[in-house]
Image (spheres, coloured by chain):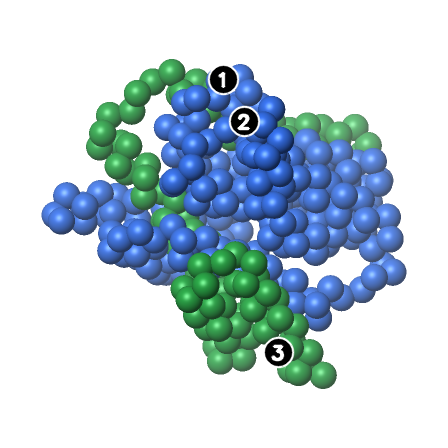
Amino acid sequence: MSETNIWFMIIGVSAVSLLPRILPVAFLSRFEFPPLLQRWLSFVAPAVLGALTAMSILAPQGRIYINSSNIYIWVFIPTLFVAIKSRSLFLSLLTGIGSMAILYNIFSI
Amino acid sequence: MRNIEVLEGVRDSIPIVLGYLPLGFAFGVMANAAGLSLLQATMMSVLCFTGAGQYVAIGVMQAGGAAITAIAANILINQRYTLFATSMVPYLKNIPTWIAALLSYGLTDETYAVAMSRYRDQEATASYMAGLNLTAHLAWISSTVLGAWLGTLIGNTDRWGLGFALPAMYICLLVLMVHNKSDAWVAVLSAAICILTAYLIPASMANLSNIIVATLIGASLGVLFNERN
């Protein structure tokens, strides 16, 4: 890709990634959504998080990897437990990162 | 500006920052290897701020693809933000529209998850949004610079366990966001639909359309459950 093309790509990718975030907020905020749509939208966040969590654990490298040698699945268990018990982002993060570091270093040697 | 809320936003962005460091760093390294200058790699993270989208654009470049291919792929990848931004609109009523729109520049999977978890019981403010989104964006930019600049010196960051920073954050935010049975069912079904779609149509993973499919079906099932209850 030439210099000009690289800059064209950067500007183009910028436009198509920013517009979907900015336009709804810019143009939809003056409308009052009907109750049914509001209820539907209230489920978007749990649905997105369910999907993101599943992908990050079961397809950590962008490919589905459901197997006992996928250490993300093993680290998921203590992290979920601590998240439910503590409801603390910090403790969940500490558990997740700590368990990951331990398992990664044990199994990659 | 209310300083305390800016600081709360900064504080809440810490898990995101931890997750972004290795990801932005990896992007810097990849961009450098694909022939982007330090300035171009940095500007890409400043102007685009789309993790998956930036990786894909570099992939297209490395495969000898055209700029327009990278842009087209990004249209698909970033479509989910339309949904995220729309679901956030009802919470942003008290922020002047142009400020809310400008701050939505920093809307990502991660800032969305953190913000929605807060807005369930606290009012959304421009100060909080700024603290959260700008800190996350700054982490993304600075890790890109580091990766593009001295990427080859640091080597594998996986052994520090940071690969699990974002999954751990998703898990905890999911737990915090589930308030009743409907929420739990929506999350579980959406997770299953997402993986099933990826399994049946592997290409859907490359452009993240499986997340859109799962969200659309999951949220619709949520409305149905709710009607019955």
Q: Which residue is mark 2?
A: B126
Q: Residues within 10 Å of mark 3 (few under 14, many from 20)?
A: some
Q: Secondary structure at mark 2?
A: helix
In the shown orientation, is residue B78 left or right of residue A41? right
Q: Colour of chain A?
A: green
Which mark, by number, is residue B96? 1
Residue B150 — which label? none
The chain letter for the residue carrying disc 1 is B
Viewer-proximal residue among A52 and A82: A82
Q: Choose between B208 and B125: the one closer to the eye.
A: B125
Say which amino acid is labelled 1.
Answer: Pro
Circle 3: residue type: Leu
CA gap between label 1 and label 2 equals 8 Å
* Residue carrying label 3: A103
Chain B in the picture: what colour?
A: blue
Residue B110 appears anywhere in the view:
yes
Closer to the camera in the image, B48 or A82: A82
